Amino acid sequence: MADFKVVLSDPKTGISYKVEAAGAMAGALMGKKLGETVSADALGFEGYKIELTGATDRTGIPARKDLPGAGKRKLLLSESTGFRPTYDGQRQRKTIRASEITSDFVQINAKVVEYGKKDLAAYFAPEEAEAAAE
């Protein structure tokens, strides 16, 4: 089973939180697509809904929401996800991952779209207190 680092962004506060997803938590994200809204109950955030906004694999290759399926493809890109041109009109062929979450991914980016009863900061408060004590 795959292990993911989920970077969860809170649009209200502008703070991002890192969540380690392994086992059943990671399995809940497998097969989902970028841009899809999923329940965050499997990640331990009761009542929350998150939108998957981006992902990268272990080599740093980004995923694109508009590329269907799973796996990698080589695309001719102008300015967009995966390529930043250095001059006007520049295009380059780059390897890009498709939008379906597979075991090849390492990091998944998400943002909160629906909030639960408990504040997000309350879930991460004990970890922050331990880090401050060290």
Image (cartoon, rainbow, N blue to C red):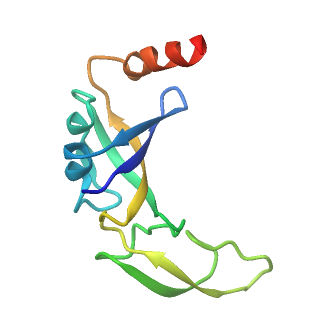
Residue at (31% x, 28% y) in the render: 115
Above or below residue 120? Residue 10 is below
Q: Residue at x 52, y 81 (%)?
A: 95
Extreme residue in the right direction: 87
Q: Nearer the viewer, residue 107 or 51?
A: 107
Farthest front residue?
134
User: Percent x, y for residue 65?
Assistant: 40, 67
Relative to the observer, which residue lies in front, 71 or 116?
71
Q: Where the C terminus falls, by quadrant?
A: top right
Location of residue 15 by image quarter: top right
Residue 34 in the image: above or below residue 128? below
Residue at 44 percent of width and 59 percent of height: 55
Q: Position of residue 76 (x, y in %)?
A: 56, 88
Q: Residue 106, image x and y in percent?
A: 42, 57
Q: Is residue 79 left or right of residue 85?
A: left
Position of residue 80 measured from the top left corner of the image (x, y, whole percent): 58, 71
Image quarter where the N terminus lies is: bottom left
Q: Residue at x 30, y 67 (%)?
A: 100
